[in-house]
Image (cartoon, helix red, strand yellow):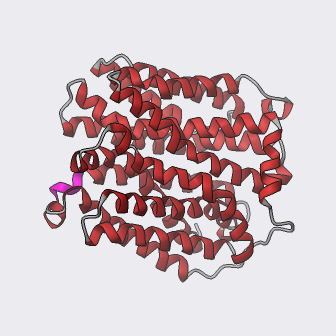
Amino acid sequence: MKLKTMPIFMAFLVMGVADAMGPMSDAVREQYELSNVMATMLSFFVFIAFAAFSVPGGLLASRIGMKKLLLLGLGLNAVAMLIPSLMVPGFALLLGCIFVLGIGTTFLQVAGNPIMRDVSGEGAYSRNLSFAQGIKGLGSTAATYLVGAIASIALFSQMGWRGIFPVFFVLMALAFISVAMLKIEEGKPEVPPSLASSLELLKEPVIALAVLGIFLYVGAEVCMARFLLPNLKEIGLDEITAIKYGPTLFFGLLTVGRIVGGIALSKIQPRPAFRISALMGAIGAGLLMTGNQSLAIAGVVLGGLGFANIWPLLFSITVEEKPERAGELSGLMCMAISGGAIVPLLMGGLVDGGLKAMAFVVPCACFAYLFVLSLKGGAKQAA
């Protein structure tokens, strides 16, 4: 593996920090005495940035280059992590920091996938990109675990839930330095994508349905990250056990599933793999609705494995429809990550309304849609 890929892998690692905002929401809710809907604003402000800045990020990259966009994203993330490290912010300022984190992470997503091609050796791009997704999952798992474990570390215990921010700041700073030192010759697009040409693609039903699928998938994943911990505590698990078998296990299985999926996809066609993944995710979320401890943990396992490869599968299947416009499709897919802002608000409202475990009907319905979507498609998609 080329040394030039290491800074990019580190950038993928710190992308996972955004996933920690869901599990952190419960501690923030207690600190500021918020409703579940208001606490979900942490995830909302991360993911709504994808709706606003994905396509503009692609346009900016075509002018300043992918490396500079990557550095801009890491710089914004570092600033977002520094402020809560130095002071106890008001809730409005905290949301502002989280929104900046969302913008920075959007730029990392937009720049990270294409720049990996520029640092990879001949024939190694697909392998490296698959491995990078696994590293991103590892970052999500580690960040989620640290949210619960940081209070036990003496150096950060006095800071409470804020103790995680200095750790995230150091990681962002190290990633920024490593990417800044990287020398790279970037490929330039012959025709830079435009906002109008990207949005025009949504007029095609196949593309629109796929973008909606990404919107619902990301929303369902954030619902799991946000509500697994309080749900498992609600059905009788103590906090340490709930952390272990909730978000930590879920994100760990996402990582394992992505690595295994990268190997399995050399033998299994994307469409059947997509169908199996969507069905597993729907069943997993359905088991969480039962409120039974054993079935809920089984639901986390099935959900983690089912959720793992939806993004690369749906992305690759969709790009096969119009490979010549992959850049514009990538922008739309990243924009659809904003589902992580909208869908959890619905689930938060159901939880506040007293539905408790039954509120997992939201991610279950999202994956039911994905399963139906997996049954459709043209000749290209079925291949």
Q: Is residue 85 left or right of residue 200?
A: left
Residue 149 in the image: state x and y as whole percent: 23, 52
Quadrant housing residue 312: top right
**Is residue 158 one of those drawn in magenta?**
no
Q: Is residue 214 visible?
A: yes
Q: Which residues are magenta?
A: 148-153
Q: Position of residue 281 (x, y in %)?
A: 51, 28
Q: Is residue 149 magenta?
A: yes
Residue 258 drawn above or below residue 173? above
Which quarter of the picture shows residue 289?
top left
- Does residue 258 appear left or right of residue 291 in this picture? right
**Image quarter of the N terminus:** bottom right
Pick the residue in front: 23 or 322: 23
The tally of labels here is 0
Residue nearer the viewer, 302 or 85: 85
Q: Is residue 38 left or right of residue 14?
A: left
- In the displayed structure image, the side of residue 369 where residue 169 appears, left or right: left
Residue 66 in percent (x, y) is at: 66, 71
Quadrant occupied by the C terminus? top right
Residue 333 placement (x, y as % from top left): 67, 48
| Residue sitting at x 49%, y 33% | 305
Which secondary structure class fits the magenta region best? helix
> In this rendering, does residue 260 appear at all?
no
What residue lies at 67% left-to-right and 54% top-to-bottom? 126
Above/below status of 248 relative to 162: above
Q: In this picture, is 115 found above or below 54? A: below
The quadrant holding residue 264 is top right
